[in-house]
Amino acid sequence: MERNVKYIWAFVFLVLWSSSAFAYQQSFYGETCNGCTAAQYKNAAILQGVGERYVADFQSGTLKKFLVSKEPGFNGTFTYIANALTVEPDHFDAFLRLKAIWDSNSHSLSYVHEIEAAGSISQLNAFDVVDPGIGRNAVTNYLSNWNNWSLGNIILFNFQSYANAFLAFRTGTPVSITIVVYFSDGSHSDFTFSFSNNTWKYEDKSSVDSHGNPIPQSRNDIIRNPDGTQNYDYRGPGNPSDLLDSLNRFSQFGVPISSGSYWACTNSPAGLHFLHPY
């Protein structure tokens, strides 16, 4: 049996739920089979193994449920049978919430959205959030109130609806939101949302200062390029404090550095070295 619906998501936001209310409490899983035939739906269920299995078709808005069993055949062989079952209403609702994301987000379950730091985080920059502490907590708290930054965005509304549901439908493709927070000086950092516990998390190695340099999180993070070198350049437009903030970090990491405002960092048997000029 199947449930099928055609619907239009209107840009009407009578209520915007707060993501701080609760995260989904339960999940169920299924395979995606877009535009499939009846036989292909059954095969997608059988490939998941014995038991009650779900198959989703985002193109048609169809969620199917099957009971897959292993039945004896001739000469000691076995065959797998997929019998259709009725889809539970709450499971179909969970599927529709995920389909809404897929429909509004160019057929993708991953979304990257850029925002400008405002309100309680307007005075911060990326150096304030690269390490755990007050600055990072301020940003995650700001993001936790979706009304601060998501109003009017249908894609974010659909992600939030999915996050607030008691039951979630999940496939082999992860559902993910990344918010790139641009601070007033032009630096930026990434934060990702965890649907399992409804919290925002800083994305490691994502902070970039206003001059376009990566902000390392540790001594081992100073060089990121595969060739074993990393340039740092604090000339030109940008926050004047970037240079001093970076020098302080390098000093904390115990990395020797000469005077100047641009270097190439190399990794040799003797350790990390900053060379000026590069």
Image (cartoon, rainbow, N blue to C red):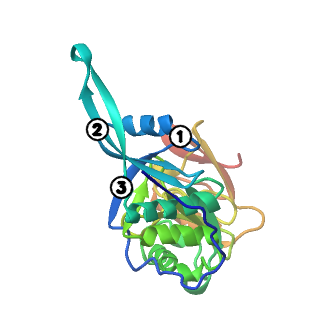
Q: Give the Cα separation between the discs numbered 3 and 2.
A: 15 Å
Badge 3: residue crowd in 10 Å (few <14, some 14–19, many ≥20): some
Residue under label 1, please give it.
267
* Residue denoted by label 2: 50
Q: Nearer the viewer, mark 1 or mark 3?
A: 3
The one of 173 and 247 positioned closer to us in this rendering? 173
Residue 85 in the image, given as x and y percentages of width and height: 36, 50
Q: What residue would you read off at disc 3?
A: 28
Give the secondary structure at mark 2: loop
Q: Residue at x 50, y 39 (%)?
A: 38
Which of disc 1 and disc 2 is earlier in sequence? 2
Which amino acid is tagged 2?
Val
Question: What is the distance, in whole Å, between disc 2 and disc 1 at their CAs?
Answer: 53 Å
Q: Residue at x 72, y 69 (%)?
A: 238
List the single residue furthest toward the top.
75
**In the image: residue 28, left or right of residue 255:** left
Q: Position of residue 7 (x, y in %)?
A: 61, 66
